[in-house]
Amino acid sequence: MNYLEIIKLITSGEWQNIESQEVCSFYWTESDQSINMKYVSGKHAGKTNSHKFVKLYLTKEEQKNCNTLKFQSNLFTSEFNLESANSHLLVASKVFGNMELERLC
């Protein structure tokens, strides 16, 4: 997959945390260059976390064929790993936390 396909997969639909069972979704905000996570259900329902002013760090080769997105700001890094359209999404982030998520149908 290329990085645009991964971004589209991550930001479409809802994801359930394997451990906590909370449901969230991700979306991009162009105005402040942020990747955002909104809790849809669970104890944090309605809460939104944002990793603002991020840049995507990938080589040109990784942009064409990758399974990990690395967003970085001045302070933090957020990594999203998605092996395929049907696999679990692994998140490692100081902003969002470390999570294993599965896509909800």
Image (cartoon, rainbow, N blue to C red):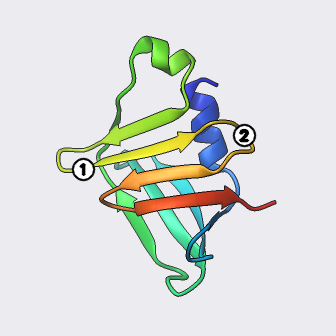
Say which amino acid is labelled 2: Ala
Residue drawn at (49%, 49%) of the image:
28
- Asked whether, in this view, residue 64 is left or right of residue 72, the answer is right
Say which amino acid is labelled 1: Phe
Q: State which tag comes first along the sequence, 1 or 2.
A: 1
What secondary structure is marked by label 2?
A: loop
Which residue corresponds to mark 1? 76
* Nearer to us in this view, 72 or 65: 65
What secondary structure is marked by label 1?
A: loop
Q: Going by the picture, which residue comes out furthest to the bottom?
A: 43
Query: Looking at the picture, how far across and down is residue 30, in whole percent?
Result: 43, 45
In the picture, the quarter occupied by the N terminus is: top right
In the picture, the quarter occupied by the C terminus is: bottom right
> Which image quadrant for residue 16?
bottom right
Compared to residue 93, the image places residue 38 above or below, namely below
Query: Looking at the picture, how far across and down is residue 31, in whole percent?
Result: 39, 48
* Nearer to us in this view, 32 or 57: 57
Which residue corresponds to mark 2? 85
Quote the CA–CA distance across marks 1 and 2: 26 Å
- Asked whether, in this view, residue 81 is left or right of residue 50, the answer is right
Compared to residue 81, the image places residue 34 above or below, namely below
Residue 30 appears in the figure: no
Residue drawn at (61%, 67%) of the image:
18
